[in-house]
Image (cartoon, helix red, strand yellow):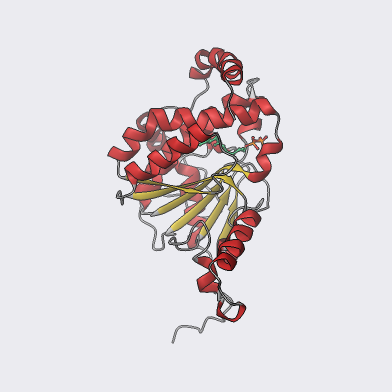
Amino acid sequence: MLGVGDRSLLLSFMYPLHRHLHQHMPKPVAARRLQIKTMSTEMNNHAAPANLNTPFPSVPYHVGIIMDGNGRWAQKRGLPRAAGHQAGVDNIRRILESSVSHGIKVLTIYAFSTENWQRPLEEVTGLMLLLSLTIKRQLNELHKNGVQIRHSGRMEGIDPDLQKQIRHALEVTQHNDRIILNVAFNYGGRAEILDAVRSALADGIAPEELTEELFSHYLYTADLPDPDLIIRTGGEWRLSNFLIWQAAYAEYYTTPTYWPDFDEKELYKALDEYNHRERRFGRVLQPHS
Ligand code: FPP
């Protein structure tokens, strides 16, 4: 899908940004930690933490993130949208580290939806190239840090070279167990359900055999537990076709903060809010005796 012409067009579009971006990028993780320790904390409605590493009584095993607001983040700074996506990618590392330190075991990030193909060609090409460059630049370090990379979405439609890179990343990291980073790329919840139905039919599953449990084994997330918490940055209140089957009983959290600005303190606020929710899964909870 990426022709030579497209690549050079995109590189020329992205290259001058790099210098400019240095001034606007999120600060390195260590520097931010230092800053956070000395920052006076204006948190959400709940108590401000003495320390962002204070353990929570309840940690969501699987967190899904709709990383929205990259474009607006860039616009606010007078930068092209591509700069926002680059800052968004940089932020993934920060939140991945912080997730590990809280004990989250699976992070599913919505990086490119089946609907995102309708964006201008330049932006689509930019996002494809960004994934490719990110794999090239960061795979070794992610692997060294025990991150297992997964992919949820359709391979079909992705440039064959990029498909190869994705498969390579999955293979190299498959035995890592510190955290699973599940990248929803060319992902759509409805497409996933349709693909699952097709696979079940192709396997000759009879209608009466099909249960929710069996069906979930046909989803891209087959061996992952359902998400406990879905976070959406950028202020919207919708799922946008993200994990629509799996999120049936997930807690939902939204913040107006744009994804590149969603830092450790923001994650803390989301987890704090999660800890104030009562998860009933459709039942009535009996009062403690
Ligand atoms: C939403 O911001 C962002 C996306 C299209 C998906 C998130 C993408 C990234 C974090 C970067 C790409 C990551 C990889 C690994 C390729 P938006 O553009 O909708 O922002 P806006 O709502 O402010 O316009």
Q: Is residue 53 visible to the viewer in this orientation of the structure?
A: no
Q: Classify residue 136 by image quadrant.
A: top left
Q: Residue at x 65, y 53 (%)?
A: 241
**Looking at the picture, does residue 28 appear above or below residue 56?**
above
State the residue in front, 7 or 260.
7
The x and y percentages for residue 20 are: 54, 15
State the residue in front, 288 or 242.
242
Total marks placed: 0
Q: Residue at x 54, y 44 (%)?
A: 155
Q: Residue furthest bottom?
A: 289
**Looking at the picture, does residue 54 appear above or below residue 87?**
below
State the residue in front, 40 or 95.
95
Q: Is residue 156 visible to the viewer in this orientation of the structure?
A: yes
The quarter in which the C terminus is drawn is bottom left
The x and y percentages for residue 81 are: 63, 26
The quarter in which the N terminus is drawn is top right
The x and y percentages for residue 55 are: 35, 55
**Looking at the picture, does residue 52 appear above or below residue 141?**
below
Q: Residue at x 39, y 40 (%)?
A: 169
**Taking the image as four quarters, which one is ligand 1 found in?**
top right
State the residue in front, 143 or 59.
143
The x and y percentages for residue 156 are: 57, 44
**Looking at the picture, does residue 43 appear above or below residue 32?**
below
